[in-house]
Image (cartoon, rainbow, N blue to C red):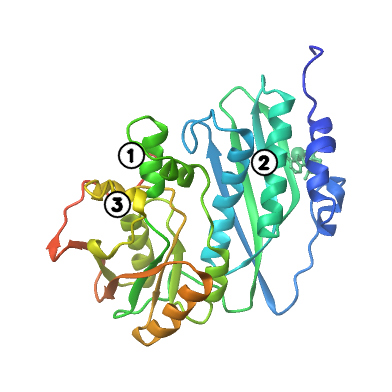
Amino acid sequence: MPEAAMDEFALIDNYFRPLAQAYAPALELNDDAALMEVAADRQLVITTDTLISGVHFIGNEDASLIARKALRVSVSDLAAMGAEPLSYFLALSLPAQTEEEWVRQFAHGLFEDQQEFGISLAGGDTTATPGPLGVTITATGLVPRGEALLRSGAKAGDDIYMSGTLGDAALGLLVAKGKLKGDALKSRYLLPQPRVALGRALRGIASACMDISDGLVQDVNHLCAASGIGAIIEAERVALSEAAAAYKGMLETILTGGDDYELVFTAPADKQAEIALLSRTLALPITRIGKTILGGGVAVLNHGTRLSLSREGYRHFA
Ligand code: ADP
Ligand code: MG
C-alpha cells in the first residue's frame, strides 16, 4: 500500500467517532450497529438519500458544503414528515485519490449542521470507489405516535400551500454553470434550508405534506396520487425571491426545477388563519398556491390560462 494511502479505520477514529461521541445509541462507533430505544408514544421516521458527484452536486464545492447538503436533504424528509431530527448514518464512497484534508472538511461541515439541527451521527460505512464520490445519508427522527404528516391525507377542496420561495435552487444551478447571474440563487442551490420547525408545527394542521425536491408540479402530482385527488396550481401565486423574480420569464424552470427543499402541504380551508399566524411566528413565508379537486393529476394555470409544461420535474432515468 502506498505511504500516503488513507485508512478507513483511521478516518473513522479521527473524523467520524467525534461526531458520534455524545450520542449513546452510536456505541461510540465501536460495534456492528447502533442500538436505539424508542419510547412507546413515539414513532421512528427513517429516510435515506444518496448524492452522487456530478448528479446532485457539481463536485468542486467545498467538502463541508457537500456534507451539509447531503445531511440537509435527509433532514428535509424528516421535516416533511413532521419529525424531530434524531440521528443519521453516513455511507461514504470515496474516490481512491481523495485527500485526508477533504475528509476533515467534510466532517467539519457535518459537525456544524449537527449543532444546527440537533442530530448526531449514529454509524455508517467508509469505502473507496473507482467511481465518483457518493454520499448516502440515512436519517432518523421521532414523531408523536399517529401524528406524522403523510402524503396521503389530502381531501378534495383543501388549500395547497408552499413554504419559502420556489425556483431559487434550479436557477442557482444555472448560475453555478455560468448560464445566469445571482449569488443568492447559487447559495440556495448549494445549501438548502430544511423546514424542520414548520414541519413540526404543521402536525394537526396539514392534511398532507411533502418536501419539494424534484420540482413542484411533479411533487404535487405525487401528493395527489397518494391522496387520490387532483390539484389546480395557480402559477402567479407561487412565491418568488427577489433574485428569482428577475427570471420570472423562466416559469417552467421555476415550477419544475428541483432542489428547493421547501414544504408543500394541504389543509382544510378553515385552517387559513392558523397558517397565517404560523407564518408570522416562524418568520417564514407560507403562500396559498392552489386547491385540491376531485379527480387526478395537476393542472397549472397562469392568470387563468392552462400552462402546458414539457416536463413536470426531475427524473433520473429520463
Ligand atoms: P462492519 O464491517 O461491521 O460493517 P465497519 O468496520 O464498517 O463495521 O465500521 C466500524 C464502525 O464504524 C461501525 O460502528 C460503523 O457504523 C462505523 N462507521 C464506519 N464508517 C462510518 C462513517 N462514514 N460514518 C459513521 N460511522 C462509520
Ligand atoms: Mg462496514
The residue singled out by tag 1 in the image is: 318
The residue singled out by tag 2 in the image is: 91
Image disc number at residue 9: none
Whether ligand 1 has any atom under 8 Å from the Cβ at mark 2 is answered as: yes
Q: Residues under labels 1 and 3: Cα distance?
A: 29 Å
Quadrant containing the N terminus is top right
Q: Amino acid at mark 1?
A: Ala
Instruction: Name the front one of labels 1 and 3.
Output: 3
Q: Amino acid at mark 3?
A: Ala
Q: Quadrant of ligand 2?
A: top right
Q: Residues under labels 3 and 2: Cα distance?
A: 38 Å
Instruction: Name the front one of labels 3 and 2.
Output: 3
Question: x and y percent of residue 139 in the render?
Answer: 64, 55
Q: Is residue 19 visible?
A: yes
Determine crowd level at label 3: few under 14, some 14-19, many 20+ residues with C-alpha closer than 10 A: some
Determine crowd level at label 2: few under 14, some 14-19, many 20+ residues with C-alpha closer than 10 A: some
Q: Is residue 263 left or right of residue 130?
A: left
**What residue is at 34 percent from the left and 67 percent from the top?**
224
Q: Is residue 264 above or below residue 257?
A: below
Image disc number at residue 245: 3
**Farthest top residue?**
2
Question: x and y percent of residue 108 in the render?
Answer: 72, 40
**What residue is at 69 percent from the left and 48 percent from the top?**
112
Question: x and y percent of residue 35 in the render?
Answer: 81, 58
Q: Earlier in the sequence, mark 1 or mark 3?
A: 3
In the structure shown, which secondary structural element does the residue marked by tag 2 occupy? strand
In the structure shown, which secondary structural element does the residue marked by tag 1 occupy? loop
Q: Residues under labels 1 and 2: Cα distance?
A: 26 Å
Whether ligand 1 has any atom under 8 Å from the Cβ at mark 1 is answered as: no
